[in-house]
Image (cartoon, rainbow, N blue to C red):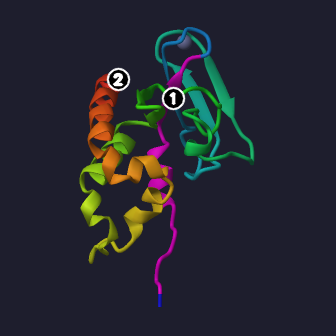
Amino acid sequence: MDRYVDKQEHFEDFNNPCFVVCPKCSECAKVSIIPGEEKGWFAPRQLVCLKCTYRDTWADSSISRLWRREGKDDHFNLPLWIQASCGKNMLFAYNKEHLKFLESYVSANLRQRSRDKEYGWSNRSSASRLPEWVKSRKNRDRVLKTIKKLWLIAGNT
Ligand SMILES: [Zn+2]
């Protein structure tokens, strides 16, 4: 029997906070769950620019996921701050935690199919949402190189 359960909780952690391009000044803005609100994908968010005075809030009931959005965030639909081209694709991350996940996933590609005794399939939940070109072993070196670039971009977030 397959005990695989798609819990999603890891992925939710990844998008809070998330860093986007400020629509007013094009600098880095932070999107995070409004303090005091319950966590979760649909939790109300606030956008606060780290450079100018721009602020916004989000409270809605429909969102779509990262890789379907071409590098935009899930709530405000703004370009993610941490992104870079990787061949003919774009690679992006919500924040450093997400980047760390990407990096360990891609560099540990071989472990992908073995079930971790302690964590079960929990990591697969987030991994299953990655596009094929990220998971493909033949792109591994290129993706890791791009991840290095992303770390520089993520630098002061
Ligand atoms: Zn701004």
Please state which amino acid type lies under the numbered disc 2.
Ile
Pointer 1 local density, CA inside 10 Å: few below 14, some 14–19, many at least 20: many
Residues tagged 1 and 2 counted as in contact (Cβ below 8 A): no
Circle 1: element type: loop
Toward the right, the furthest residue is 61
Question: Where 39 sits versus 155, above or below?
Answer: below
Please state which amino acid type lies under the numbered disc 1.
Leu
The residue pinned by badge 1 equals 80
Q: For marks 1 and 2, give the CA distance.
A: 11 Å
Q: What number of labels is visible?
A: 2
Residue in the image at 66% along x and 46% along y: 64
Residue 148, percent across and down?
A: 26, 31
Residue in the image at 47% along x and 85% along y: 2
Question: Where 132 sits versus 45, above or below?
Answer: below
Foreground pick, 2 / 23: 2
Foreground pick, 19 / 104: 104
> Ligand 1 sits in which quadrant?
top right
Q: Is residue 64 left or right of residue 67?
A: right
Residue in the image at 25% along x and 62% along y: 110
Residue 147, percent across and down?
A: 31, 35
Residue 128, percent across and down?
A: 48, 60
Residue 157, percent across and down?
A: 37, 26
Quadrant of residue 109 within the rendered picture? bottom left
Circle 2: element type: helix
Foreground pick, 63 / 70: 70
Q: Is residue 40 left or right of residue 131?
A: right
The residue pinned by badge 2 equals 153
Q: Which residues are magenta?
A: 2-22
Q: Is mark 1 within 8 Å of ligand 1?
A: no
